[in-house]
Amino acid sequence: MKGKIIVISAPSGCGKSTIINEIMKRGNVDLRFSVSATSRQPRQGEIDGVHYHFLTEEEFRKRIDEGMFVEYEEVYPGRFYGTPVSEIEQTVNQGHNVVLDIDVKGGVNVARRFGNQATTIFIMPPSVDELRRRLENRGTDSPEMIDQRVGKAEYEISFASGYDHVVVNDNLETAVIQTEKIIADFACQ
Ligand code: ADP
Ligand code: 5GP
């Protein structure tokens, strides 16, 4: 049987990576992470091929032309992100579930393309002020980048009603348990 596709989206800084990493660490559900490609610079500690496939903008555009992405978006001006076809196909064909950490437009596209093989989860911040605090505490982005990410949050939140599930990440443990349950329930449907 083919694996399922789980799309997780949220405004940047909301805690998606933290939640996904925690669920994978606990290992209660069969889940593989789809490593996206991006033309942005690696953050400190990010490893090529693990967190992202880091490409130049030129390499990224070449792969678009070669049809190597299921979907891609210019999430921020000049910074491209895309889901390689291979990341999904290999995993689901081997019967494993795959989780995609992608933006709201990418999420809509994947849901449309894969129908009921996919489910979508939106991680909601308790407030936009709290989102800013988390980005500041994370300490990985410049003040300008933080403004850009927070500025986009309200637009992204407007997509939440189109997602199959919404999880508020106020208390991290609660959010992890809720997200894990949604995935476990969907995986055995
Ligand atoms: P995203 O992947 O959505 O951009 P991260 O997972 O990197 O966000 O989380 C952003 C920051 O917020 C990190 O420093 C993380 O430790 C912190 N964080 C995540 N969830 C919570 C929470 N429930 N309460 C407080 N801080 C959180
Ligand atoms: P970050 O720079 O914080 O890692 O990611 C910025 C945004 O890009 C996040 O909303 C993240 O979900 C999104 N993103 C990451 N990979 C992909 C992808 O493959 N496709 C799309 N559409 N968005 C992605």
Image: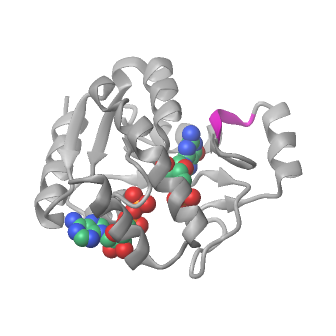
The image quarter in which residue 67 lies: top right
Which quadrant: the C terminus?
top left
- Residue placed at 18% from the left, 65% from the top? 172
Of 81 and 79, the residue lying toward us: 79
Residue 66: say if magenta: no
Quick check: 139 left or right of 6? right
Q: In which image quadrant can residue 85 be found?
A: top right
Quick one: 101 or 87, which is closer to the camera? 101
Residue 40: quadrant of the picture? bottom right
Q: Position of residue 61 (x, y in %)?
A: 84, 41
- The residue that appears at 70% across and 46% down in the rendered structure is 77
Q: Is residue 161 left or right of residue 149?
A: left
Left or right, 161 with reference to 68? left
Q: Residue at x 34, y 57 (%)?
A: 14
Q: Is residue 25 visible?
A: no
Q: In this view, does 170 lie above or below 73?
A: below
Vertical placement of 35 versus 161: above or below? below
Image location of residue 52, percent across then percent down: 61, 61
- For the N terminus, the image quarter is top left
- Closer to the camera in the image, 138 or 127: 127
Q: Main secondary structure of the magenta part?
A: strand
- Range of residues picked out in magenta: 68-74
Lateral position of residue 170 relative to residue 78, left or right: left
- Report the number of numbered marks: 0
Q: Position of residue 127 (x, y in %)?
A: 24, 53
Which of 22/139 is in front? 139
Quadrant of the picture in which ligand 1 is shown: bottom left
Is any atom of residue 185 visible in this view? Answer: yes
